[in-house]
């Protein structure tokens, strides 16, 4: 780098153009896809709502970790690409794909027909189901039906929100919506609602780890259908999707997936 160029750069930085400059660099950098040899070097920005242990959460060092993180990182290694995880609020997350702010979403996202209209999903990588959490004292709740006239907390716009809407009605004042699953579960702990409904892995993890041990879970496999998590990409990004799917195949075939599964869920 010449002295003049260096000086210009510092002037830019001082002028607060750092961000723009970064964006410009990204845009003008030669796209690795253009040359087959460098195709493996492309780094994709991955959106994840890191409030969803054990799938995606922040450890003591504020690093984003979890099952989804390990799976997609292993997938990327096999699929020949790099990933950078960026904490992204659940609400508005889907819009970051067409906006170009995120290349991949890795956030325990259930593949649904409605979502398939606006984004493309990888092959499924995890099976889940909704699970009910209640306070131990609510002995009258034995199934999902028993929530019919109760106050229920959900994370906004999740499949948990959808199933509860079906039971209580879309506009029911008894549905309390929160921007994260921990907030929904805290509301249950503090007695603001009678139950919370969400993905089994996350609800079970929260109930098991909450120091008060005041909550229990209620399964209802009759009311809740299995759901499948997929990684999402912008609609039409077939090239990236193919790399992700190849990676998923590879980590399932060589035991890496099973290892990661065991790390987070035991057997
Ligand atoms: N699986 C549910 C859904 O797709 C909930 C996912 C929420 N994920 C998160 N990281 N908050 O609707």
Image (tube, rainbow, N blue to C red):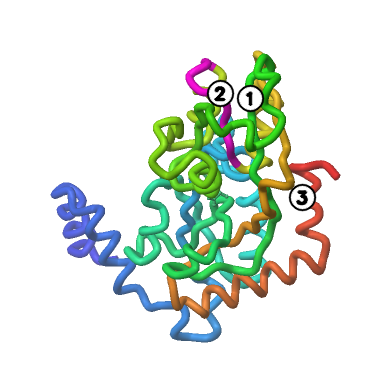
- Residue at the image position 50 percent from the left and 27 percent from the top: 151
Helix, strand or loop at label 1? It is strand
Query: Looking at the picture, how far across and down is residue 81, in whole percent?
Result: 57, 69
**Which quarter of the rendered picture does the C terminus lie within?**
top right
Query: Looking at the picture, how far across and down is residue 183, in whole percent?
Result: 48, 29
- Residue at the image position 54 percent from the left and 55 percent from the top: 106
Q: Which residues are magenta?
A: 190-198
Q: Give residue 260's mark.
A: none
In the picture provided, is 172 more to the left or to the right than 64?
Answer: left
The residue that mark 1 highlights is 134
User: Which is more N-terminal, label 1 or label 3?
Assistant: 1
Between the C-alphas of marks 1 and 2, the distance is 6 Å
Image quadrant where residue 21 sits: bottom left
Helix, strand or loop at label 2? It is loop
In the picture provided, is 199 more to the left or to the right than 48?
Answer: right
The residue that mark 3 highlights is 261
């Amino acid at each position: 780098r010449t002295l003049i160029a260096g000086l210009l750069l510092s002037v830019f930085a001082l002028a607060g153009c750092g961000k723009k400059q970064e964006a410009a660099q990204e845009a003008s950098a030669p796209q690795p896809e253009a040359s087959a040899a460098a195709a493996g070097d492309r780094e994709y920005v991955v959106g994840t709502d890191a409030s969803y242990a054990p799938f995606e959460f922040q450890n003591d060092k504020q690093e984003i970790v979890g099952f989804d993180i390990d799976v997609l990182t292993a997938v990327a290694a096999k699929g020949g690409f790099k990933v950078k995880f960026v904490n992204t609020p659940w609400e508005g997350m889907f819009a970051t794909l067409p906006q170009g702010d995120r290349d991949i979403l890795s956030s325990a996202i259930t593949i649904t027909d409605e979502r398939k209209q606006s984004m493309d999903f990888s092959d499924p990588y995890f099976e889940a189901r909704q699970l009910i959490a209640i306070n131990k004292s609510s002995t009258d709740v034995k199934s999902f039906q028993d929530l019919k006239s109760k106050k229920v907390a959900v994370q906004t716009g999740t499949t948990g929100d959808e199933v509860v809407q079906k039971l209580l009605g879309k506009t029911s004042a008894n549905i309390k919506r929160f921007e994260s699953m921990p907030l929904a579960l805290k509301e249950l702990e503090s007695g603001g609602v009678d139950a919370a409904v969400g993905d089994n892995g996350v609800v079970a993890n929260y109930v098991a780890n909450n120091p008060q041990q005041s909550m229990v879970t209620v399964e209802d496999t009759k009311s809740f259908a299995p759901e499948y998590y997929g990684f999402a990409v912008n609609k039409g990004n077939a090239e990236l999707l193919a790399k992700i799917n190849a990676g998923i195949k590879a980590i399932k075939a060589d035991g890496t997936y099973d290892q990661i599964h065991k790390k987070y869920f035991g057997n």
